[in-house]
Amino acid sequence: QSQAIKTPTAIYCSGQIPWDRHGNLVEGTIQEKTAACISSLKVVLEEAGSSIEKVVKVNVFLTDMANFASMNEEYAKWFTHKPARSCVAVKQLPKGVDVEIECIALP
């Protein structure tokens, strides 16, 4: 699996789960896990020659919509330019995590 695919018009990032740069799952609050997901996306985007500010679409997957408000609180700190977003509840996510985030950005 690719972390991102770069086309002439967009960068499509794979979903990121809450893990640190060493591949260890992040424990803690949904805010801390959301920050870890977005931090990973930021690294992927920068490696592809883009940035978090160039994100145009975000998809958030939560295993429990009760976490929406807390996730959204952290999310708003990173995406101040308010890209289009979907947030859906899913039955489960890889490695038993409770949040996964993917995005599309301009190059």
Image (tube, rainbow, N blue to C red):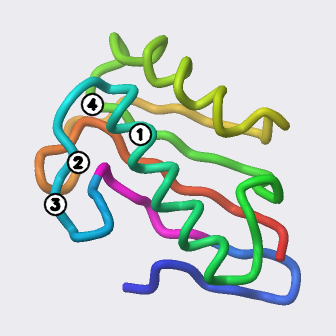
Pointer 1 residue = 61
Q: Which mark is residue 63?
A: 4
Local crowd size for mark 2, using a 10 Å CA cut-off: few (<14), some (14–19), many (≥20): some
Which image quarter holds the N terminus? Answer: bottom left
**N-term-proximal mark, 4 vs 3:** 3
Residue 6 position, x and y percent, is 70, 86
Contact (CB < 8 A) between labels 1 and 2? Answer: yes
Local crowd size for mark 1, using a 10 Å CA cut-off: few (<14), some (14–19), many (≥20): many
Contact (CB < 8 A) between labels 1 and 3? Answer: no
Depth check, mark 1 against mark 3: the one in front is 3
Pointer 2 residue = 93
* CA distance separating discs 4 and 2: 7 Å
Contact (CB < 8 A) between labels 4 and 1? Answer: yes
Depth check, mark 2 against mark 3: the one in front is 3
Contact (CB < 8 A) between labels 4 and 3? Answer: no
* Image point (27%, 24%), residue name: 29
How many badges with numbers are in the image? 4
**N-term-proximal mark, 1 vs 3:** 3
- Dominant secondary structure of the magenta stretch? strand
Secondary structure under badge 4? loop
Q: Which mark is residue 71?
A: none
The amino acid on which the numbered mark 1 sits, given as a three-letter code, is Phe
* CA distance separating discs 1 and 3: 20 Å
Q: Which mark is residue 24?
A: 3
Secondary structure under badge 1? strand
* Image point (16%, 60%), residue name: 24
Secondary structure under badge 2? loop
The amino acid on which the numbered mark 2 sits, given as a three-letter code, is Leu
Residue 11 position, x and y percent, is 71, 75
**N-term-proximal mark, 1 vs 2:** 1
